[in-house]
Image: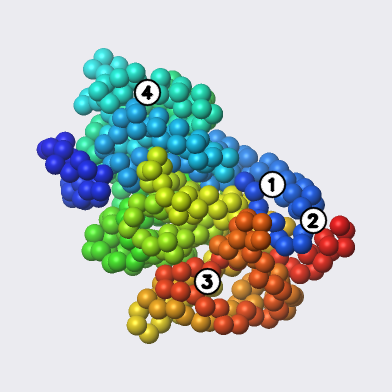
Amino acid sequence: MLLTAWSAASKSRKRHKYRNLLRLGVISTSFTQPPSVNLGMWMSLLLLSGVLSLLSSYANAGNNGLALTPQMGWNTWNHFGCDISEATILNSAKAMIANNLPQLGYNYVLMDDCWQAPARDPTTGAPVADPQKFPNGIKDLSDQIHNMSLKFGIYSSAGVYTCGGKFGSLGFETIDAQTYAEWGVDYLKYDNCYNEGLAGTPRISFERYANMSRALNATGRPILYSMCNWGEDGPWNFASTIANSWRISGDIYDNFDRYDDRCPCTSMLDCKLAGFHCAMARIIDFAAPLGQKAHQGAWNDLDMLEVGNGGMTFDEYVTHFSFWSILKSPLILGNDITNMTEETLSIITNKAVIALNQDPAGSPASRIWKVPLKGGGDISLWTGSLVNSQWVIAVLNTSPKTVSWDIEFSDVFIDYGKSAQQDSWVLTDLWQKDDSGNWGKNLGTFKGKVKGVKVAAHQTKLWLAVPASMVKRDIQEL
């Protein structure tokens, strides 16, 4: 019945309808250089900070040393759903290279659900790939991906079936992990469908997901472990010792802020039904209090990116990419990268914004305040610390109208005392380009506040803030 349902909805733009039906059965890198800063000194400081930071965190990175900055790559599901094959994966990998995405950090090629044969190997119980979709097998596919200097990822579920109705890994963790290692898998996305009711408390969910974590580690192969339990049982409280990332909510869909009863919770802290069809801005709200739980090697996953799938405007996709970056979510593309517009490419290749995501400090931005606006929506201020005394500042307008607002440094640096609040700061707009065509336009030096910031409907202003004293010191050393 599940396969019949998929055949009836095989077109990629119907993938969410299909997943909705399935879930009903589940009762349960480079930094933007600040203006006038000595480039050599900038890069030397960045390199030193990064090396020291990564070394200090290596032993705590989910016990596997991976994802010391949020992982980046591409996944089949958001655009292709179950309609995948060897050609789908290889053509997308080639498109990644043709668009120079690996140079920006997009290194993982991730094959999501529906790669499986109808049943496991009847003798060994090992997972088997669909011979029609993957006639040369997964090992051959993995080898081809590796020959492109990319990494290869696979999907399963901590249940008896996957969300696509294929065989799951519950009770088969050891043989599955061993087989993935033999295939040369570098990444496992591990879902939560058909989990036999093994949820309801953090301890129960921990044990179910820890079984696969132990099995992966026992293979001796470094395999990034991406938990996808939709925020059930608060994975931010238990997953950091067993996984490199964990989903915080129900599945995203390609819409800015529409409420959907299938994503019923207003907060994930005590959510009893994570659901799916969660609009992008709602996931930002869900993530707001959770940044404190993320750190190097262990990240809140806000779900795959929808940039380029057509359901949002340019400004909305800019907001999407900006917040996934500053909240230190994995940046996993979910569009058809073999057929991208220049607009889409410009968003996902913004080096300055990617640098925020990959900042070695690994500190997610925090929401300082959120103010409701007449006519619906709100305006909010977010700030986060970066290496070398830098900061990111984001102003988000979810309302349907342009808003003008004063941004007070007493708010921006509320946790860092009067010295920072009263300092002068050089601001760079990371979604504008400088005279050389590089992302990051100098807005000037500001003290005390930035007056009358105009933020259009569903737009985000994203700034890099550097102490003016640091800029002056670098100028003197030129």
Q: Residue furthest bottom?
A: 374
The reply to whether dot 2 and dot 4 touch (C-beta < 8 Å) is no
User: According to the image, label 1 marks what residue?
Assistant: 50
User: According to the image, label 2 marks what residue?
Assistant: 38
Q: Position of residue 216 (x, y in %)?
A: 45, 30
Instruction: State which mark lies toward you, 1 or 3.
Output: 3
Q: Compared with residue 94, is residue 361 higher up or lower down, i.e. above or below?
A: below
Q: Is residue 278 visible?
A: yes
Query: Which badge, 1 or 3, comes first in the chain's sequence?
Result: 1
Residue 138 is labelled as 4
Instruction: State which mark lies toward you, 3 or 2.
Output: 2
In terms of depth relative to the viewer, which is nearer, 242 or 388?
A: 388
Tell me which amino acid carries mark 4: Ile
Q: Position of residue 391 (x, y in %)?
A: 65, 64
Please tell me how crowded label 3 is: few (under 14), some (14-19), or many (20+) other residues with Cα within 10 Å: many
Query: Which badge, 1 or 4, comes first in the chain's sequence?
Result: 1
Query: Which badge, 2 or 4, comes first in the chain's sequence?
Result: 2
* Secondary structure at numbered mark 1: helix
Tell me which amino acid carries mark 1: Gly
Left or right position of 224 against 465 = left
Q: What is the C-alpha distance between the residues marked 3 and 2?
A: 28 Å
Query: Which badge, 3 or 4, comes first in the chain's sequence?
Result: 4
User: According to the image, label 3 marks what residue?
Assistant: 395
Tell me which amino acid carries mark 2: Asn
Image quadrant occupied by the N terminus? top left
Please tell me how crowded label 4 is: few (under 14), some (14-19), or many (20+) other residues with Cα within 10 Å: many
Please tell me how crowded label 2 is: few (under 14), some (14-19), or many (20+) other residues with Cα within 10 Å: some
* Secondary structure at numbered mark 2: loop
Q: What is the C-alpha distance between the residues marked 2 and 4?
A: 48 Å
